[in-house]
Image (spheres, rainbow, N blue to C red):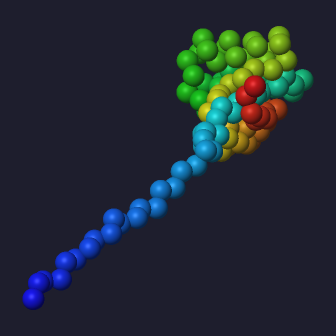
Amino acid sequence: MTAPTLSLAPVEQEVTSTDEVVAPDVPWVTIVWNDPVNLMTYVTWVFETYFGYARAKAEKLMMDVHVKGRAVVSNGARETMERDAEALQGYGLWATFEKDS
């Protein structure tokens, strides 16, 4: 009598692939708009205080707001930009966030 032979079939593995590339939801920007209420020194102080920007950078951004009517003050993930805009609004500045173009 001969011993039975075992036949092992190859194990099938499920391979999943996706053609969709998931990109991070960046960049977004926070924009501060010029307003007739806040003093330039106050806007500079807010940029220094909230963002920790050096005086020179804070003053340059403030001048962009004053002269150009707006300045991009931060960029990053949407949630962070939303938080920055809300914080700046809490300081009384006119701030919005939007997807960077």
Left or right for 50, reference 15: right
Q: Is residue 84 visible?
A: no
- Please identify the quadrant where the C terminus is shown: top right
Q: Is residue 61 above or below residue 101?
A: above
Seen as rendered, the residue at the extreme front is 1
- Please identify the quadrant where the N terminus is shown: bottom left
The quarter of the displayed image where residue 61 is located = top right
x and y percentages locating residue 37 in the rendered image: 87, 27
The quarter of the displayed image where residue 55 is located = top right
Q: Residue at x 75, y 12 (%)?
A: 63
Q: Residue at x 72, y 23 (%)?
A: 72
Left or right for 29, reference 10: right
**Viewer-closest of 34 and 6:** 6
x and y percentages locating residue 58 in the rendered image: 64, 18
Q: Residue at x 69, y 33 (%)?
A: 28
Seen as rendered, the residue at the extreme right is 36
Q: Is residue 44 visible?
A: yes
**Viewer-closest of 15 and 96:** 15
x and y percentages locating residue 19 in the rendered image: 61, 44
x and y percentages locating residue 59 in the rendered image: 67, 14
Seen as rendered, the residue at the extreme bottom is 1
**Viewer-closest of 27 and 1:** 1
Disc count in the image?
0
